[in-house]
Structure formats: C-alpha cells, structure tokens
Image: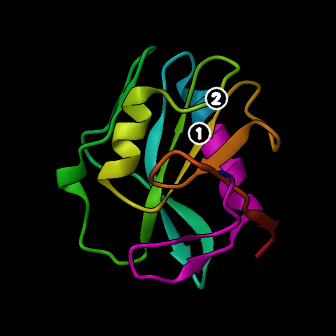
Amino acid sequence: ARKDYVFSMNRKRIWAIDVGLIESFNESAKASSPNEFASAMREENGVLTELVFLPGSIGSFTSATVPLHMLPIDFSLAGTVHSHPGYSNRPSDEDLHLFGSFGKVHIITCMPYDITSWRSYDKDGNEIKLEIVDI
C-alpha cells in the first residue's frame, strides 16, 4: 500500500523534500561510489532539509553502517538516506531492519544519482510520495 505522508519523531507531518537535499545526497552518493553512503536527515516544518552525518558511519560496496547509538538528541531528525551502488532503489531486508530501528522516513538513491533516482519509504518499507520544493 502506498502512503502519501509520514510523521517524523516529533509527530509533524513530513510532506516534502528540499531539492537541495536531493542534490546533496546524490553528490555524496557519487563521491562514495562504488561504496554505499549513509546519513541521517533533518526536517523543518514538515520538509526534509539537510543531511546529518554521524561519526563512525562506514560505507562498503555491499552496505553502509550507521551507528544509531551516536545519534544526537535532536527531535528534528526524521530518518535516514543511503545509496545503492547499482540501479535499484528498492529496500533490502537489512534496509527494512534499519527503517524499523530509527525514524519515520527513509530514502534510497541509486545510479545514476539524479533527481529521479531516489525513492522514499516509511518505517515499514512502504513507498511514500514527497513533494519536491525549493526552499
């Protein structure tokens, strides 16, 4: 079932993503390639706005590890974003485990790492739609 909205940890409705954030995570994914890239994301007023890099994050060709115990106490953190080195942005079993561990919205981007290569998911792995805005 596809959902058109998701709630962040602070219960605000997340309805959009800033185009600058899409550009940022795609550039990070390109720079990390062929390894995976991973980060947390911050939201403001229901819009995903920026990457939050966590100390100790490790990317490899087959996975990216995000040390959730290093998350700051920050109620604007809404979820995660990571890359896949191939052409699939579908979540793996490991991705679904991460989704259920932290946050309410999760993004996977894949090659060619452009404006159309990402998808967003809720904590259960259901695809959700986010409006792209320019703030």
Location of residue 68 with respect to 7 vertically, above or below = above
Which residue is found at the position 25% from the left and 59% from the top?
Answer: 71
Q: Which residues are magenta?
A: 2-27
Which quadrant holds residue 87?
top right
Location of residue 21 with respect to 47 vertically, above or below = above
Compared across the picture, whether 61 is left or right of 70 comes to right
Q: Position of residue 38 (x, y in %)?
A: 45, 40
Q: Amino acid at mark 2?
A: Lys
Mark 1 lies on residue: 108
Which quadrant holds residue 117?
top right
Q: Amino acid at mark 1?
A: Ile
The kind of secondary structure element at disc 1 is strand
Mark 2 lies on residue: 30
**Dot 2 alpha-carbon crowd within 10 angstroms: few under 14, some 14 to 19, many 20 or more:** many
Compared across the picture, whether 113 is left or right of 40 comes to right
Name the N-terminal-most of marks 1 and 2. Answer: 2
Q: Residue furthest left?
A: 69
Q: Position of residue 125 (x, y in %)?
A: 52, 45
Q: Position of residue 109 (x, y in %)?
A: 64, 36
Which residue is found at the position 70% from the left and 41% from the top?
Answer: 118
Q: Position of residue 67 (x, y in %)?
A: 24, 44
Q: In this figure, what is the number of numbered marks?
A: 2
Location of residue 76 with respect to 23 vertically, above or below = below
Question: Mark on residue 122?
Answer: none
Q: Quadrant of the C terminus?
A: bottom right
The kind of secondary structure element at disc 2 is helix
Q: Is residue 44 magenta?
A: no
Which residue is found at the position 20% from the left and 54% from the top?
Answer: 70
